[in-house]
């Protein structure tokens, strides 16, 4: 690099013309301006695209514990996993989820158990607030509920028979909650949801933590 600079300096000294140097500088300056303008335009275009509000992609993954109150069944605990899929419009986020709960009861000598595995998605509208780390929301979603019910029927002293039935039903969810940051990579979630599912309507309170990806 130093050798190249030395050769250029000797060439300029040989020419010995201040006008040539000034003309070269004058010619170089206009060439630099379009490049800066082009860069500025590209930057402006990038900012305009980003400000559109849509930023779809896997942003967070998390786990949750829930208290579930199914219709005509005692409340029980459940657990699940979820994925934040970013935004599809300004202030509207999309979440995929997988949840599970089960409950067993004994009534009139019959032991019954019900379980529900749900695979679904929810859209959340984040309400703008002044607090930067607090994101309240309301939302709605759809879920596929894979339900199973099992009944153990006594048939005699020390003997029994079991009957079970499985169904898949579509459910509609309504709810809301809040998300808040507890560290640069961890968010805390507190939510309440009501699921409309044929014969198994259910209300759930859910708390969870999510890990922010891509940092």
Image (cartoon, grey):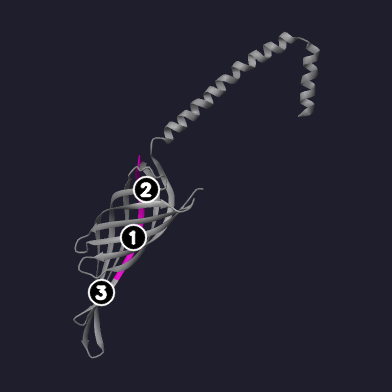
Whether residue 154 is situated above or below residue 31 in the rendered picture? below
Q: CA distance from mark 2 to mark 1?
A: 16 Å
* Label located before the other in sequence (2 or 3): 2
Q: Magenta stretch? A: 89-102
Rendering quarter of residue 29: top right
> Does residue 94 belong to the magenta stretch?
yes
Which is more foreground, mark 2 or mark 1?
A: 2
Which is more foreground, mark 3 or mark 1?
A: 1
Quadrant of the snapshot with the N terminus:
top right
* Residue 69 spot, x, y in % from top left: 26, 65
* Residue 39 spot, x, y in % from top left: 53, 27
Q: CA distance from mark 3 to mark 1?
A: 26 Å
Whether residue 134 is situated above or below residue 30 in the rendered picture? below
> In this view, which residue lies farthest toward the bottom?
157
- Which residue is labeled 2 in the image? 135
Q: Residue at x 37, y 62 (%)?
A: 80
Residues at discs 2 and 1 in contact (Cβ within 8 Å): no
Label 3: few (<14), some (14–19) or many (≥20) C-alpha neighbours in 10 Å: some
* Residue 44 spot, x, y in % from top left: 47, 28
* Residue 211 spot, x, y in % from top left: 46, 54
Label 1: few (<14), some (14–19) or many (≥20) C-alpha neighbours in 10 Å: many
Rendering quarter of residue 129: top left
Element under disc 2:
strand
- Which residue is labeled 1 in the image? 206
Element under disc 1:
strand
- Which residue is labeled 3 in the image? 150
Which is more foreground, mark 2 or mark 3?
A: 2
Rendering quarter of residue 98: bottom left
Q: Dominant secondary structure of the magenta stretch?
A: strand
* Label located before the other in sequence (2 or 1): 2
Q: CA distance from mark 2 to mark 3?
A: 41 Å
């Amino acid at each position: 690099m130093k050798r190249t600079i030395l050769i250029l300096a000797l060439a300029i000294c040989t020419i010995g013309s201040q006008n040539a140097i000034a003309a070269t500088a004058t010619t170089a300056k206009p060439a630099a301006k379009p490049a800066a303008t082009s860069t500025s335009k590209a930057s402006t275009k990038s900012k305009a695209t980003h400000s559109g509000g849509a930023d779809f992609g896997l942003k967070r993954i998390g786990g949750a514990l829930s208290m579930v109150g199914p219709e005509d069944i005692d409340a029980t605990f459940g657990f699940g996993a979820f994925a934040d899929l970013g935004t599809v419009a300004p202030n509207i986020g999309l979440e995929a989820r997988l949840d599970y709960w089960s409950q067993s009861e004994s009534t009139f000598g019959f032991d019954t158990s019900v379980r529900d595995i749900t695979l679904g998605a929810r859209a959340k509208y984040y309400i703008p607030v002044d607090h930067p780390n607090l994101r309240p929301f309301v939302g709605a979603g759809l879920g596929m509920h894979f339900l199973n019910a099992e009944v153990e029927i006594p048939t005699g002293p020390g003997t029994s028979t079991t009957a079970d039935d499985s169904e898949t039903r579509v459910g509609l969810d309504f709810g809301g909650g809040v998300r808040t940051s507890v560290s640069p990579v961890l968010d805390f979630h507190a939510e309440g949801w009501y699921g409309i599912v044929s014969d198994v309507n259910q209300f759930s309170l859910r708390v969870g933590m999510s890990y922010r990806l891509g940092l």
